[in-house]
Amino acid sequence: MIAIIDYGMGNLFSIYNGMKKVYDNPMLITADNIPSIRTAEGVIVPGVGAFDDCIRNLEPFSEVLIEVVESGVPVLWICIGMQILFEASEEGKEKGLGLIPGKVVRLPSNVRVPHMGWNNLHLQRHSELLDGITDADYFYFVHSYYCVPRDEDATVASVEYGVELAAVVSKDNVYGVQFHPEKSSQKGLQVLSNFVGMCK
Amino acid sequence: MLAKRIIPCLDCDFGVPGGRVVKGIEFKQIRYAGIPWELAAEYDEQGADELVFLDITASHERRETMAHVIEKTASNVFMPLTVGGGIHSLEDARRAFNAGADKVSVNTAALKNPELVNELAKRFGSQACMVAIDAKRRYVRSEEDAGKAIEEGREIIDTREGKCWFECSFYGGRKFTGVDAIKWAMEVEKRGAGEIMLTSMDRDGTKDGFDLELTAAVCDRVNIPIIASGGCGLPSHIKDVFKFTDASAALAASIFHYKEYTVREVKQYLNENGVHVRL
């Protein structure tokens, strides 16, 4: 079973629908059934919204999520979900989860903010998550802050918007995507499908 | 590199069972153009970057039909979906998001209660809060008029047709507010809007091309993405709006609904003419 964490941050309908296209049995996990995350073969933490709200709303799930990460189960963190993997953000006061060393900063002022729309990736290193994806493929982004990993190797793919910023990061079994795969048409579904493949 | 977005707009009558896409000419005459989710799937196939559903229904029984249309579309089409036209409160917005919308667009309700923009942005995030501005040219023909308009706080723009300011309309173009559209754009950015859908009332339905002067004036004064709308009748109109203004996206309805051009044909044309699009 692949679990989708429903912690009240944004549009669960989209990620649930997207997952249903590539996988038979995604399960929405609310605060009422947190222990069942332990039985998941893979976990998705979706999200739109602000950094502090995200950290606070995820609080009830954090302990079990960290436990699952430590057990080696693949976990995919989307958009603001990716940002809370880091230690801190200029957007908020709360501490991030710190699963990937680094910080989150505001987009530069020479570009329109938010970074909204379809942008193509620059692949930096191999990851199963991006199997079948090339530099010519576009994904839907919408964000005002971006992740700066301390360790360059954390970046799987980057994207250019005023600066060259991290679009996909990974560390061991933790994966973060700044774009919305569930809003990125066929290529987005491909990324979700790759993730499903990694969960068995 | 960030691609310029092409957004087909589906003006929907949810008073008809199942909903219908319609195309009005200058907000008056109405013709039917198809079933919303069928058109949505077609546009997805053609490479549309995003879709906007505008509820033009006057009645109140529309809400469930709207939710049904969005649900049906969102389970099948994986791109950003915006719902506008019937959003007057946080509750309306919540209903649209629960059905699978990614953004809501507000016009009348925001002009009547500007706090709504702050509340939407705070509750659902700026990225989900689009403000639609329907702007109409008001020419100032004499020095005296110009002086008066400036005194009233209008932004006067020099256009090829003469000096003018732009007035916001609401209630689907049926009423005027006296509010300066350019000032309003700057205000909604401050209030937390993540994007502006800017429609020229002078051009809407005419197929004469976008109002480039209006679009450029707003793009110059705000730093959030601007969707240009109103007047698109040819692929070259879209090329022009990207060439002469800093619009992030172009919205069009009739040239796609009546199959004059597919989204793909438009994008290929743009690509050949130096506009960066996702093919």
Image (cartoon, coloured by chain):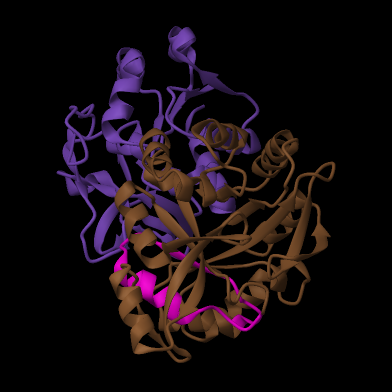
**Picture coordinates of residue A152, whole percent (x, y):** 19, 49
Quadrant of the image for the N terminus of chain B? bottom left
Residue stretch rendered in magenta on the structure: B207-235
Q: Colour of chain A?
A: purple
Q: With respect to residue B158, does B101 lie above or below?
A: above
Residue B279 located left or right of residue A119: right
Vertical order, B54 against A8 (above or below) = below
Residue B228 among magenta residues:
yes
| Residue A58: image location, x then y, percent | 34, 21
Quadrant of the frame with the C terminus of chain B = bottom right
Residue for point 71% across, 70% down: B254
Residue B195 image position (x, y, % from top left):
42, 56
**What hue represents chain B?**
brown
In front of the other: B238 or A32: B238
Residue closest to the eye, A52 or B28:
B28
Q: Is residue B226 left or right of residue A147?
A: right
Question: At which x and y percent is residue A199?
Answer: 49, 28
Residue drawn at x 51%, y 53% is: A132
- The answer to whether one can see residue A114 in this image is no
Is B240 colored magenta in this rendering?
no
